[in-house]
Image (spheres, rainbow, N blue to C red):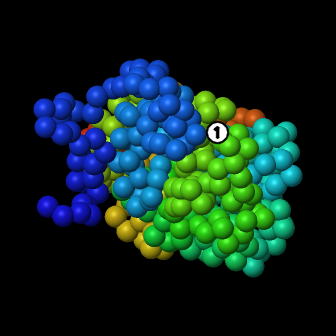
Amino acid sequence: MSRPYKKETICIQSGWQPKNGEPRVLPIYQSTTFKYESSEQMGRLFDLEENGYFYSRLQNPTNDYVAAKICELEGGVAAMLTSSGQAATHYAVLNICEAGDHIVLSSTVYGGTFNLITCTMKKMGIECTIVDPDAPAEEIAKAFRPDTKCVFAETIANPALVVLDIEKFALVAHEHQVPLIVDNTFATPINCNPFKWGADIVTHSTTKYMDGHAMALGGCIVDSGNFDWNAYPDKFPGLCTPDESYHGVIYTEKFGKAAYITKATTQLMRDLGSMQSPQNAFLLNVGLETLPLRMERHCFNAQKVAEYLEGHEKVAWVNYPGLKSSQYYETAMKYMPHGTCGVIAFGLKGGREAAADMMDYLELAAIVTHVADARTSVLHPASHTHRQMNEEQLKEAGVASDLIRLSIGIEHVDDIIADLEQALSKIQ
Ligand SMILES: *Cc1c(COP(=O)(O)O)cnc(C)c1O
């Protein structure tokens, strides 16, 4: 058998590959530390002169095998796991931005990302300019400044379900000599590989479809290896000039295409420590094995439910990129021809009040602060995940105050629709 394998095969076979007599299933290396024969060898590990595990705050084999699988799925050169999607976003940006720098941010990103970048990172001295992802490239170009270090956006925005024109964003980022970082959580690498369209770095909340069973928080950063940091050494001194905290190592010189992930591991994990537990990585790996099967079912079910809702008299609007009526249908067809995700946004004619009533009547669909797992769930972002935002911020984020976020699971679609039907029949 020759590589590259197809994604279904990667999900099962890649990452951990046991040698003769080793366990078939990825072991959980439940150990904080690793043993060495000589003090000198340990020293070389600390100098990054030798590869090897020494402390699980930086690296752990279980995590690395799972990261390698996700890396292969995305078509990247290096990847790392983090304790959550938030940590992945934070490190992906902080790895190339410091106080005094600037980020261009899509307005429709996940609420957690929006808070992290516009509030917390602002306190750290990193500024951002928010852009409308649907704006023409010339408009987006106006947001860039000499101190801009990256562009951040989502392939499918949670919960606005805006599908990103990845090529447009990649072009405008590259024209301004900075990488495009894309959060690919909702599409997953099964439905979209942003690197193919020019994105440089991909982040994931593995908490969602990748785990898929709502069991374990986690995140992942994958580097395409395509961005040429050395072409702009003044912009990216952290990667292109000596790191005093590692005896003057220059990441791009010593690690080539692995420079970005190596720096994020050796500096950010070392200093900030948002490591994923090996136990969670193990669960994530089990989830990844069935990701292609589940995504197919999520998308199939969501398409049926979206069509059902669109035809319902009490429904005011439905936004699902798989619907022909969606303004993102063409973009979705281009970037995700096999399906988008299982999340649907819709509003009722009865508005915000009817939304709350209907959610309370649902029996199968649970009200939970989660999306993108095997069980159908529902949330009202304006009252829940996005409640810190004011009306104007909600509007910019593409979150109407009546928007119901319905995350379609992998149950039988007839049962999901029957549940919606009975709840809708009870509201005004
Ligand atoms: C949930 C989510 C995150 C944050 O991930 P956590 O694992 O909850 O920290 C980031 N981006 C998107 C698109 C998400 O849906």
Image quadrant where one finds the N terminus: bottom left
Q: Locate the C terminus and report the quarter of the image it occupies.
A: top right
Picture coordinates of residue 32, whole percent (x, y): 47, 21
Q: Is residue 15 above or below residue 6?
A: above
Ligand 1 closer than 8 Å to label 1 CB? no
Residue 352 x/y as whole percent: 65, 40
Q: Residue at x 65, y 65 (%)?
A: 229
Residue 151 relative to residue 226: left or right: right
Residue 316 is left or right of residue 394, and the answer is left
Q: Residue at x 54, y 56 (%)?
A: 255
* Residue 8 in which image quadrant: bottom left
- Amino acid under disc 1: Leu
Q: Nearer the viewer, residue 192 or 231?
A: 231
Residue 56 visible in image: no
Q: Is residue 299 left or right of residue 406?
A: left
* Quarter holding residue 404: top right
User: Which image quadrant for residue 290?
Assistant: top left
Q: Residue at x 66, y 67 (%)?
A: 230
Residue 318 drawn at (x, y percent): 52, 55
Q: How many marks?
A: 1
For label 1, the crowd category at 10 Å Cα-Cα, with few meaning under 14, some 14 to 19 and many 20 or more, is some
Work out whether residue 282 or residue 422 is closer to the camera in this orientation and state it: 282
Q: Secondary structure at mark 1?
A: helix
- Residue to which mark 1 is pinned: 268
Q: Position of residue 92 (x, y in %)?
A: 62, 49
Is any part of residue 49 visible from this angle?
yes
Q: Residue at x 75, y 35 (%)?
A: 388
